[in-house]
Amino acid sequence: MATGIEGLEVVRFDDDALAMQALISGQVDATAAVAAVANDVITKRKLDNLEVKREVPLFTLYWSMATRKDATELHQWLNNFIYYAEVTGKLDELHKKWIGTPIPGGKLPTF
């Protein structure tokens, strides 16, 4: 019992979709998922018997953007946008609007 929780059995799935489907179908009692994915599935399928437990975060996941190496103007514009949105509080507002929670871990790292 490596987890310290008696009776806990860890089941692994190949991707988030399979893990969520196992939860929805009752094959498992809980799953670890990105809050945005879990909230979206619960809302769209009207699953009032499921909830996201935000007080037990297993990890903090930051998303990022990729640009071509030679797209320096775009890269700089994105950096400036993120920085401005961070210092004005707009980034947290956007996160709350689209994800439903404040930015995990507080302020994002900026340049």
Image (tube, rainbow, N blue to C red):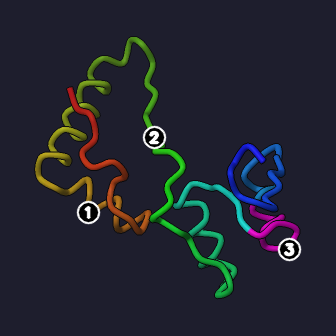
Instruction: Name which residue type carries label 2.
Output: Trp
Callout 2–callout 1 Cβ contact below 8 Å: no
Mark 1 neighbour density, 10 Å: few (under 14) some (14–19) many (20 or more): some
| Residue toward you, 103 or 77 | 103
Mark 1 residue element = helix
SS at badge 2: loop
- Mark 1 sits on what residue? 93
Up-down: is 29 above or below 94? below
Q: Is residue 66 left or right of residue 87?
A: right
Sequence-wise, the earlier of marks 1 and 3 is 3
Query: Would you call the spot at circle 3 few (<14 residues within 10 Å), some (14-19), or many (20 or more)?
Result: few
In magenta, the rendered stretch is 20-29
Q: CA distance from mark 2 to mark 1?
A: 16 Å
Question: Left or right: 90 with respect to 33?
Answer: left
The residue tagged 3 is 25
Q: Quadrant of the C terminus?
A: top left
Residue 5 place in picture, x, y as percent: 70, 58
- Residue on which the image places disc 2: 63
Label 2 or label 3, whichever comes before in sequence order = 3
Q: Can you tell which quarter of the image residue 69 is in?
A: top left
Which residue is painted at 65% across and 55% down in the image?
A: 32
Majority secondary structure in the magenta region: helix
For badge 3, the amino acid type reads: Ser
Q: Is residue 39 one of those drawn in magenta?
A: no
Q: Tell me the residue at 43%/24% (across/down).
A: 67
- How far from the left and from the top, in percent, is residue 47? 68, 83
- Amino acid at circle 1: Glu
Residue 84, quarter of the rendered image: top left
